[in-house]
Amino acid sequence: MPMTDETIQRLNDINRQFYEITAPEFDQTRGQAWAGWLPLSEHIKDAPLSVLDVGCGNGRFGLFLAETLSAPIEYHGIDNNAQLLDYARQALAPLESIRATIEQHDIINETLPDKSYDVVVLFGVIHHIPSLENRQKFIQALSQRVNDGGLLVFAAWRFYEYERFRKRLVDWDESISVEKNDYLLDWRRGERALRYCHYVDDAELDNLVASTQLTEIDRYRADGRDNKMNVYSVLRKGR
């Protein structure tokens, strides 16, 4: 049975509140590039580039691109947290090689920008999208924003495979009816907060990739203490 709209909104509100509480801590502790971005850079042409960064947070992927590529970059970052977006603007504004458009955007309740890009990325986000149906529709919508020959890249956080995260699981309120692999995790740094996270397993990842009708040119694991925390899928459109 599909997840109800009411439940989707409740889960989205949980995560919106989570980032309102933790935004300063997230900015302080997540200033470095992800290890998984380095192999991704091998697939990105060092040429004038347009990029859509969905769930851009403090803009660190934009910083990574500016430091990695010599060509000019048109960077469009969207996120639903105003404070993280302010951090992104401050970080990217001094860089001459990147022209940044930073916008507040709720991806659960608003449609994606009606443009196409050379590279579309989704990092640290897919696990926050409630309902299997919504995740499939969202990945499909992202694939439609990719220019011919361009890339769609998303990473699935494999938190449930780690005991330290399973120890942070919190029981759901009985009034919320969630789907398989939906979890509530507590935050143990600074002020306490809860976040909704979905564990994307291999079968769902395969289905998400297939739903794009793009060609998967690479899949690998990276990030975290063991460099296996996220599974990356790199998809190319057309040629």
Image (spheres, grey):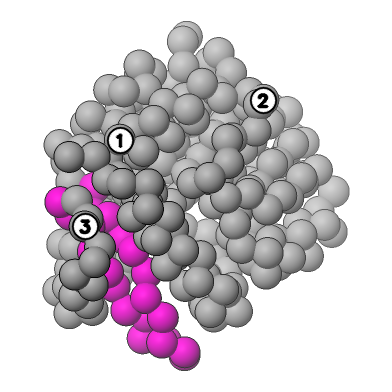
Question: Dot 2 surroundings within 10 Å: few (below 14), some, or many (20 or more)?
Answer: few
Residue at 37% in and 53% down: 6
Q: Earlier in the sequence, mark 1 or mark 2?
A: 2
Q: Looking at the rendered structure, which numbered label has been put on residue 133?
A: 1
Three-letter amino acid code of the residue under disc 1: Glu
Three-letter amino acid code of the residue under disc 2: Lys
Please name which of the two marks, 2 or 3, marks the residue nearer to the observer: 3
Q: Is residue 86 visible?
A: yes
Q: Quadrant of residue 212?
A: top left
Q: Which residues are magenta?
A: 180-200
Three-letter amino acid code of the residue under disc 3: Ser
**The one of 105 and 94 positioned closer to us in this rendering:** 105
Label 3 SS: loop
Residue at 39% in and 61% down: 10
Residue bearing the label numbered 3: 177
Residue bearing the label numbered 2: 115
Label 1 SS: helix
Please name which of the two marks, 1 or 2, marks the residue nearer to the observer: 1
Q: Is residue 190 magenta?
A: yes
> Gap between marks 1 and 2, in whole Å?
23 Å
